[in-house]
Amino acid sequence: MAAVILEVRRPLAGSILYRIARGTRAYRLKPMPLNFPREVLLVEIERYCSFRDCAARNMIGLTKAEAIEYRGFDCSKCQRFNDDTIGIDAVPDSWADAIPLNDSESAN
């Protein structure tokens, strides 16, 4: 027999209780806790175009996977590619082990 949701109630405690009717009886399901792990999903870095005739400011948003593969950006003004790497100081501590060091940082 298929269950039909008649109404959704939100008690003061914040949980959602469903009233489900099967025939003439109504059942309540226990509220399930929601778990949202907190982790950094996106970082934003500021870069300037390396071409002298442009030098535009570019704001770049990167996920962890994109930060690992990051090798440069296209300028938003002149549309030219700029070779670049991301430093350990630009990413959260939890991402540091996944980001490869560039030559200037590995020499220190």
Image (cartoon, rainbow, N blue to C red):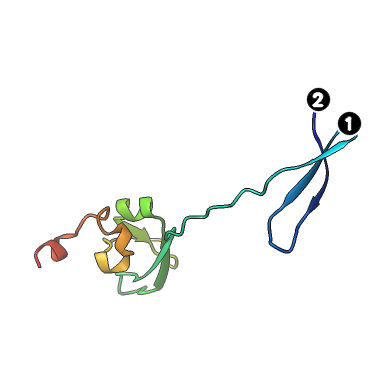
The residue located at (80%, 28%) in the rendering is 2
Hey, which quadrant is residue 61 in on the image?
Answer: bottom left
**Mark number, residue 69:** none
Q: List x then y, in percent, for residue 104.
A: 14, 65
Q: Is residue 7 above or below residue 89?
A: above
Q: Is residue 8 above or below residue 25?
A: below
The residue located at (9%, 64%) in the rendering is 107
Do we see residue 103 in this rendering? yes
Q: List x then y, in percent, for residue 91.
A: 32, 64
Task: Compare residues 13 and 3 and report the one nearer the observer.
Answer: 13
The N terminus lies in which quarter of the figure? top right
- Specify whether 19 is left or right of 103: right
Q: Residue furthest right?
A: 24
- Specify whether 102 is left or right of 64: left
Give how far apart the Cα atoms at labels 2 and 1 are: 9 Å
The residue located at (44%, 68%) in the rendering is 77
Residues at badges 2 and 1 in contact (C-beta under 8 Å)?
A: yes
Mark 2 lies on a secondary structure that is loop
Question: What residue does disc 2 label?
Answer: 1
Three-letter code for the amino acid on which mark 1 is drawn: Gly
Do we see residue 78 in this rendering? no
**Mark number, residue 23:** 1
Q: List x then y, in percent, for residue 84.
A: 27, 61
Label 2 crowd bin: few (<14), some (14–19), many (20+), radius 10 Å: few
Three-letter code for the amino acid on which mark 2 is drawn: Met
Task: Compare residues 75 and 64 and report the one nearer the observer.
Answer: 64
